[in-house]
Amino acid sequence: MKLLAFDTSTEALSIAVGWEAGGRLERLEHSGPGGAQASATLIPAVQDLLRRAGLRLQALDAIVFGRGPGSFTGLRTACSVAQGLAFGANVPVLPVDTLMALAEQARIQQGATQVVALLDARMDEVYSAAYAFGDGVWRQQGEFRLGRPEALEVPPGWVLAGNAFKAYGDRLPAAADRIEALPTAAALLALAPALLAAGRAVDAAGALPLYIRDKVAQTTQERADARALAAGPP
């Protein structure tokens, strides 16, 4: 199996190419700054990894990418690049939930199998979802959530994994063990075989983002109303 994977949903850019050679799984990785820089560096870095691996884009079995939730700019970058590469090479895409990739990264790092994955959503909120690992696959427990850090619920014995501890550390559940982690391309590669076997691959037109927050900016009037409310009665 030959796969290209990348995630641009956070402040970090993560790319990997994986392929089987001589009965072994080989992998090359690249990491760098995410955010706005990812749109300029993603394609050149992908081309470099493929060249170093000796792989042609058309030979890939799928292009795997983190579909969200996460940074709006990052998700648009990932989806547009995945879609463009897949159209040009006529290969399928495999959209993967970034929070599931984060849970898998926590398993890679520390063997965690019951994870509440969370990402800093800015605006004083976090994205979160709970995942349990068994029989070789992750299963999501409940819905995706977007809310205040102090509203997060962690079942006894589960761990928190994500990138929100520096920003909201004392507002997150104190009893839960914590794993500093990000959704990585290596985690996407690890998840891909089971997801492909489950029929989750789609054609290039299906390279779409998963948005949990449908609004990222207030209107001028909304900002004025918020300031007036904060100021209190005249």
Image: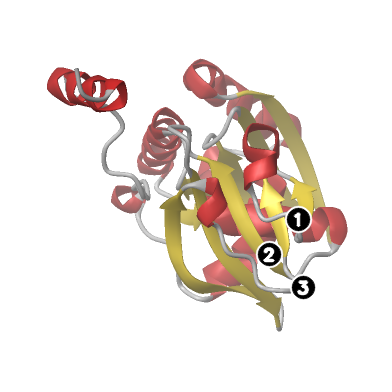
Instruction: Please give left or right for residue 165 compared with residue 129 in the image.
Output: right
| Residue beneath disc 1 | 106
Residue 232, compared with residue 201, is above or below; it is above
In this view of the protein, which residue sits in the foreground, 158 or 39? 158
In this view of the protein, which residue sits in the foreground, 219 or 187? 219
Question: Can residue 59 be seen in this snapshot?
Answer: no
Residue 218, image x and y in percent? Answer: 23, 26
Give SS at disc 1: helix
Which of the two labelled residues, at mark 2 and mark 3, occupies the earlier sequence position? 2
Question: Can residue 155 be seen in this snapshot?
Answer: yes
| Residue beneath disc 3 | 157
The amino acid type of the residue labelled 3 equals Gly
Residue occupying image coordinates x 72% and y 52%: 19
Residue 177, image x and y in percent? Answer: 80, 58
| Residue beneath disc 2 | 115
Do the residues bearing badges 1 and 2 touch, measured as CB atoms within 8 Å? yes
The amino acid type of the residue labelled 1 equals Ala
In this view of the protein, which residue sits in the foreground, 62 or 39? 39
